[in-house]
Image (spheres, coloured by chain):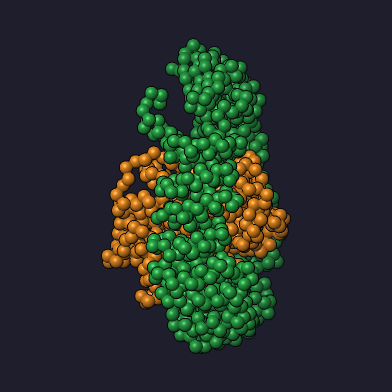
Amino acid sequence: MIPRAVSAAALGLDGAVPAGDRIAVGGIGIGSRGTYVLGCFLGEPDVRFIAVCDIKAARRTAVKDMTDKRYGNKDCAMYRDFRDLLAREDIDAVLIATGPNWHATASAYAAKAGKDVYCEKPCTKNIAQSLALAEVFRRTGRVYQAGTQRRNLPHFAFACELARTGKLGKLLAVHAQPAGLATAMSGWAEAQPLPDKEVVDWDMYLGPAAWRPFNQRHLDGFNFEKGGGLVGGGVLEWGSHCVDLCQWAANADNTAPVEYNPPVNGRVIARYADGVKLVIRDDGWLPLGSCPVRFEGEAGWVEAGDNGKLVLSSPELLAGRKVAEIGGYPATFHVRDFLNCVKSRRQPLTNAEAACYSHIACHAANIAIFLNRKLAYDPAKNEFIGDEQANRLRSEAMREPWRI
Amino acid sequence: MRGGNDKDREMHKLGCVTLLLTLWAAAPAQAAEENEGRLIAILRSDAPRAEKAITCKRLVLYGTKEAVPALAALLPDAELTSWARIALEAIPGPEADAALREAAGKVAGLPLVGIVNSIGVRRDAAAVDTLAGLLANDDVEVASAAAAALGAIGGAPAAAVLTRALAGAPVAVRPAVGEGCVLCAERLLAAGMRDAAVKLYDAVRNSADMPKQRLVDATRGAILARQAAGVPLLAAQLAAADKALFALGLTVAREMPGADVTKALAAALERATPERQALLLMALADRDDPSTLPAILQAAASGSKPVKLAAMGVLGRVGSAACLPLLLDAAAQADADVAQAAKAALEDLSGKDVDAELAARLDAAGGPMRAVLIELAGKRRIAAAVPALIKAADDAEAGVRAAALTALGAAIGPADLAFLIGRATAPRHAEDGEPAERALLAACIRMPDGEACAAQLADALWDLPVSTKSTVLKRRRESAGNWVWVPVSPRSTLLEVLGAMGGAKALATMVEAAKDDDAELQDTAIRMLGQWLTTDAAPALLDLTRTASSPQNQARALQGYLRLARDFPQPEPQRAEMCAAALRAAKRPEERKLALDAMAKHPSIAMLRALVEAAKTPELKDEAGAAALAMAQKIGGDSADVPALLAQLGRAPMKIEILKAEYGAGATVKDVTATLARYAGGFPLILLPSPNYNTSFGGDPVPGVVKQLKIAYRIDGKQGEVTLRENAPVLLPVPE
């Protein structure tokens, strides 16, 4: 069933929301993407954004100005160290939109501090972090929503529903776009003069990443330590969205493919235990915009992308609905889903468990690309079978004092 | 850098490490034969710190117990300790454990925190005593890390240490001890030591100075570990005044099986405030337990507004036909929130008896209830309601007619399709035209036999007269993505529906319409063909590039054809053939550019062959020839056909001389002059036997490092020089 938002009125949102019923939200690492998501939060009547943390003074100030202007006050507090923000007992939930280096670690600290978390993707740097993330949120009972908002976009949800409920017949293959297969990571660039801590807190920026001297390229580079570990980037870029949708479509929210092949002709083909193929590829997509997915069954197929449209093997699959009525942005649905769950204590669509296995699938594919060999994976034990090098790549030590 | 000072050399190496690391990440397979001894030697040398850091990373893959001492030596180093632990955490075996334990006794401050964290990650049971000692460390960070590590290790000895620390640890360390206890209890539970786990959870719950979230963690564990015996503790949370504990109760109620949990929720519902009742109802419904229905129905009937709304929100999932009177009554109420919640529940209720009762009620209903039932008949696609909906489509009220038409679009079957065709092409009231068209489209695209439906539409289309009387201007999207205002007559309306449906009959009708005498029909058909979603429309579009009635329509057909060639998945030879045909059909320079752009997007031998063929025609010689050269560069030496194809371009061969060519990195280079000279032909593009330089040049001169190819050459007597990144196409810039 396509997710239906719980009525705002059912959660007490009709009319003005009493101050005591509002969800107090803080933001950690709010840059360009974070500002977009923050806009979605600020548009919700039951949200009060009261604090921002960033290692860059300019960003802290920009977010404070934005929220103060919206609320007509000067109340948004600023922090350089997110632990100080998390220590505030009046904050219910946090939006984490730092670089990927921090996502899992900051999420775990927030959960342990009793906060619910909406965190941007990619959510983890390696397989071990993925498992730890799920474990921490299970243990603390906190609500987690990964910023993979496409699960809450109706046309993608509809496509997944077709696959999940057998309307495409026996599922044969799910296809995801990675936006590039090449694995790459940040290194150690030459030292430059260290900025004032209050302007740019380099030590906090490095966080769980291994130490290296300050260099502007690392600070401003695209997604410092994305994926982290020895195997960075690669499938994680769009995969955290598209593979995530494939996992949902394949009813695999609590498992991952059991086999990963190295790239052949630009395609990584993985396989689930039930034989369904996960095809990770950049080519051959219908012109449906970015982040496309395709699901193929014995009785039909569906393809969807960011332009909000679906293409189906048969219009019959629409069951009378028009594509234009199904699809589209904005990502507000995803934020609303999170906020509803903060109140109801239900698990959101991209909860920590679902995000854990979506990311494991991406990390395992990256490791197969990196080692350039076929890998077998046991999702019950969460280990590669008979490949010690692959198993060594499942985790990476975090810089002191950080731990999950 | 030769001759520079030490600092220069250091900076140069540092600069290289970022690149080196990135490239090593991209191509580790080439470094598979990494020599552990060489890596250990780097760690022990006076190599730059950057190089040592990257060496630690490499040892993750290639390190054994032999590397442990060299790595352990870096543990006290504030800058390299985290890099060393990256390898030490990964290398299996007791040697790494021992090294970490030993370092824990010698190092202090942040490096010690990292070491303790690594011990926890490795779950070194032999470290319990060491960690127990560190619990008393003056450094709160160290003591806290030790508590967490003990929890991660688990087992009875760790549990005993942590239990003692709950009371004895300094207040600042107490939260970490609580975390360690909960972690340890989880390990005990997983090992089947349920009683010990419960004891540890309870110890945290009863401990002083514990942060709220630790109490929540421990309470959750204490409930779940007790299994059925944990229900009273769950009930206590559901009744707790504390917001966090009540929230925990809602969470755990969804995790725990058993009828007693349902009963605890129902009991809490009776005593809760209205705000909490709404949340409890949701938790109750999430249990998918039929026994919860009476409580939910009662809440929907008599609760406060938030409670009613919450109850209705769950009735759709757990309710039955028995809920119909209450929900229908609510759906017809003036309160928009209540009505909306009731309608949503009615839409979701399962059971054919629900459909039958709704259809029966529609026959007799009036006023607001009739509107509700019409909407529901559509939402639930109730076939039995179609006669009543057809009747309602002739109602005196325009709103009722529109709602009935919309519902018919969702519910109507093939037998009654003619009704909607009639209303869409000849509405009895002008305002019914729009909803009837939308309904017809909705109906047609879901008909099980699409081809039969398309045939019925086509017959109706050709039966309609050409008339401009009922033509109206409507905003439509062109294949290029732009919006335009176009005239839409009833015939065009049916053609648009056919276009949305797709399929063989729809395509055949579209082609026929594109050649009809009716200019408006032609225009609509070409627009729809330009947006076709399968490549079987390609032959028709190509034909229309010649036969369409106007140059403008011919150009639109070409754009649509190129869209299919460029954007749709298909075998590369077929794509190349389509692009070549488009190039031949292009009449204007901008059309040729579009075709060449499409070809450039899909480099392949087939496409190169198509370009070379195109370059043989005088008017395309320059453009297609240049595109062919560019494509050959992209394809490189993948195919032996490339040189032969390029030779057909008819360009005057150049005299290429390779003066010197070196392949390698830094000071280690290999002379490959003879190899390059052998493959140099009459073009500045040299196609090697393999795109992989190592293969073409007979081996890898510097394994594990990305290399460069430096070439000094002469073209037609003029000297040039180029440096290429490993495996790049060998293209020699023509000297001025």
What residue is at 47 percent from the left and 36 percent from the top?
B45
Classify B379 as above or below B242: above
User: Do we see residue B2 in this rendering?
Assistant: yes
Location of the N terminus of chain B (image quadrant): top left
Q: Which chain is green?
A: B
User: Do we see residue B355 in this rendering?
Assistant: no
Location of the C terminus of chain B (image quadrant): top left
Q: Which chain is orange?
A: A
Residue farthest along the top direction in this orientation: B717
What residue is at 45 percent from the left and 76 percent from the top?
B207
Classify A340 as above or below A283: below
Where residue B51 appears, x then y in whole percent? 46, 38
Where residue B552 appears, x then y in whole percent? 52, 40
Where residue B510 appears, x then y in whole percent? 63, 48
Where residue A78 appears, x then y in whole percent? 32, 61
What residue is at 61 percent from the left and 62 percent from the top?
A254
Classify A279 as above or below B156: above
What residue is at 54 percent from the left and 82 percent from the top?
B233
Nearest the camera: B586 or B614? Answer: B614
B718 relative to B253 in the view: left or right:
left
Nearest the camera: B657 or A258? Answer: A258
Q: How many marks?
A: 0
